[in-house]
């Protein structure tokens, strides 16, 4: 058989296996009875081990080498497929099997310990496991290899090609202007507060309504409930999202827009790329640019709510009948330095990420001990956000990422924020009447542009390459800072 035909068959098989694992994960988070947990963990271990064996097979290495020898004659898409499969093959084969097993055992224990530590707000419960995870993550960096800094190897897992130096210069550009803007705008927009709870069914209905307006295709996806909202792919025509609903929070709106943004990306990938390693968003940063684009750039803008606020008022008269559009839009953009990253406004959000980046880098290079974390966390929050951390639960224990063994993940959130503003600028060059487009509720026009420029390409281009194609320039903080300055100046009037 032709090398590339064989490689595509191999790719399709691995994709099927990963989608099967994703289905098991979806079921676990959405529907699985509590007592099924142990059985499910066993199923995961069995299937993961079989998948891993297929991923490191010599047969695949040989196929990749043959395909690489024919590079010149391949199409752009086929060359990309070889590149993406090579990357994943190298990552999988560089980590010894005993290491993978130990890492997976430890993260599973660490998640349990983290849950308990957070519940009791007692870092000491998590500390010994985190110490071992840091040691293993350093080991992981050594196995994977890097040019300048061990943290580079971990960053690259989530954002191909990203380096410590690049993240440092990104934050160097962001930090001072963000701190200045927070000072300027904090407390000047009144937050919304609700005396009456939102009916659960109404929340879900409104979330669905927004998803339909965005162009989410319910014949190729669905919306369910889970403790933490997420998006997953179970097949080319099966992109699913979850949302959460609380009695007095607008999370149901912004969660739906956020996950909807991730899902539109996945649903927009070209049919030609189906059933292959290219049928996937290109990186976490670019993925997050899509979710933040819909959640913040579009979903917290005045024109968007010109169209949808009357419907929100009609759906929830007890909460909104006496709130005017302007007060609502100011309320959903209120700037309040706080303790919790996931609740942060657009101005303070990246300062939360900066704290985590500095800590991760120091842990991985060995200039910071895990035991010092609670204290360092407090100092950095005082310094960057001007807030006092009273408990570890609301401090160093708030995120699950480290318990998952994910070091190097957080910076992709900031990349997503920066890229969303840069992509918005490119959109505005395409559609000079952008405000009217949103005020008309013509979100499908926006979606179709994103599809043509970004979604359709799946993983064909490298993340930085894609961004240059779409916006004409590499990632820069400039666009995001200009977007924030203009937006918040207008909001405070
Ligand atoms: Mg996201």
Image (cartoon, rainbow, N blue to C red):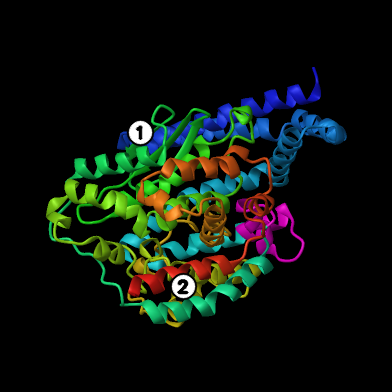
Q: Which corner quadrant of the image does residue 85 belong to? A: top right
Nearer to us in this view, 182 or 130: 182
Residue 171's disc number: none
Residue 175 vertical position relative to residue 450 in the rendered view, above or below: below
Instruction: Say whether residue 177 is left or right of residue 296.
Output: right
SS class of the residue under badge 2?
A: helix
Magenta span: chief secondary structure: helix
- The residue sitting at 58% across, 69% down in the picture is 478
- Give the camera-side residue of 101 and 143: 143
Q: Which quarter shows the N terminus?
A: top right
Residue that label 2 marks? 485
- List the single residue furthest toward the top: 1
Q: Position of residue 210 (x, y in %)?
A: 33, 43
User: Which percent across, then down, holds residue 377?
Assistant: 45, 75
Foreground of the two, 242 or 51? 242
Specify the segment rendered in magenta: 137-161
Left or right of 239? Residue 1 is right
Q: Position of residue 50 (x, y in %)?
A: 60, 30
Instruction: Give the residue displayed 47% in from the left and 40% down from the top.
Output: 264
Q: Quadrant of residue 166?
A: bottom right
Contact (CB < 8 A) between labels 2 and 1?
no
Residue assigned mark 1: 36
Q: For disc 1, does the CB lie below 8 Å from ligand 1?
A: no
């Amino acid at each position: 058989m032709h090398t590339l035909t064989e490689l595509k068959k191999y790719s399709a098989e691995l994709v099927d296996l990963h989608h099967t694992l994703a289905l098991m994960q979806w079921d676990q988070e959405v529907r699985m009875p509590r007592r099924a947990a142990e059985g499910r963990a066993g199923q995961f271990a069995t299937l993961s081990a079989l998948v891993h064996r297929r991923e490191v097979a010599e047969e695949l290495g040989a196929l990749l080498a043959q395909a690489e020898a024919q590079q010149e004659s391949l199409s752009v898409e086929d060359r990309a497929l070889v590149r993406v499969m090579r990357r994943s093959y190298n990552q999988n084969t560089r980590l010894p099997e005993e290491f993978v097993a130990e890492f997976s055992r430890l993260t599973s224990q660490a998640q349990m310990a983290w849950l308990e530590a957070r519940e009791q707000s007692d870092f000491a419960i998590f500390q010994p496991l985190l110490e071992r995870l840091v040691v293993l993550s350093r080991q992981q960096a050594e196995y994977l290899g890097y040019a300048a800094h061990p943290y580079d190897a971990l960053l690259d897992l989530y954002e191909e090609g990203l380096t410590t130096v690049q993240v440092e210069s990104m934050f160097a550009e962001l930090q001072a202007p963000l701190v200045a803007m927070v000072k300027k705008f904090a407390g000047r927009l009144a937050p919304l507060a609700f005396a009456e709870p939102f009916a659960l069914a109404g929340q879900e209905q409104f979330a669905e309504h927004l998803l339909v307006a965005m162009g989410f295709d319910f014949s190729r996806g669905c919306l369910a409930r889970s403790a933490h909202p997420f998006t997953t792919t179970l097949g080319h025509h099966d992109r699913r999202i979850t949302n959460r609903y609380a009695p007095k929070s607008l999370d149901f709106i912004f969660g739906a827009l956020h996950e909807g943004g991730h899902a539109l990306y996945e649903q927009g990938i070209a049919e030609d790329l189906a059933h292959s390693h290219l049928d996937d968003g290109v990186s976490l940063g670019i993925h997050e640019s899509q979710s933040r684009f819909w959640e913040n750039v579009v979903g917290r803008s005045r024109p968007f709510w010109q169209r949808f606020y009357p419907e929100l008022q009609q759906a929830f008269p007890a909460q909104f009948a006496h709130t005017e559009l302007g007060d609502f839009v100011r309320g959903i953009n209120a700037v309040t330095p706080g303790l919790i990253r996931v609740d942060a406004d657009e101005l303070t959000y990246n300062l939360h990420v900066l704290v985590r980046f500095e800590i991760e880098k120091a842990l991985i290079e060995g200039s910071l001990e895990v035991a010092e974390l609670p204290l360092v966390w407090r100092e950095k929050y005082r310094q960057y956000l001007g807030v006092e951390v009273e408990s570890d639960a609301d401090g160093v224990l708030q995120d699950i990422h480290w318990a998952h063994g994910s070091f190097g993940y957080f910076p992709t959130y900031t990349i997503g924020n920066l890229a969303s503003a840069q992509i918005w600028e490119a959109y505005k060059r395409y559609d000079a009447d952008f405000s009217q487009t949103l005020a008309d509720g013509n979100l499908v026009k926006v979606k179709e542009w994103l599809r043509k420029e970004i979604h359709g390409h799946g993983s064909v281009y490298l993340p930085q390459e894609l961004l240059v194609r779409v916006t004409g320039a590499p990632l820069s903080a400039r666009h995001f800072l200009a977007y924030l300055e203009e937006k918040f100046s207008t909001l405070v009037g």
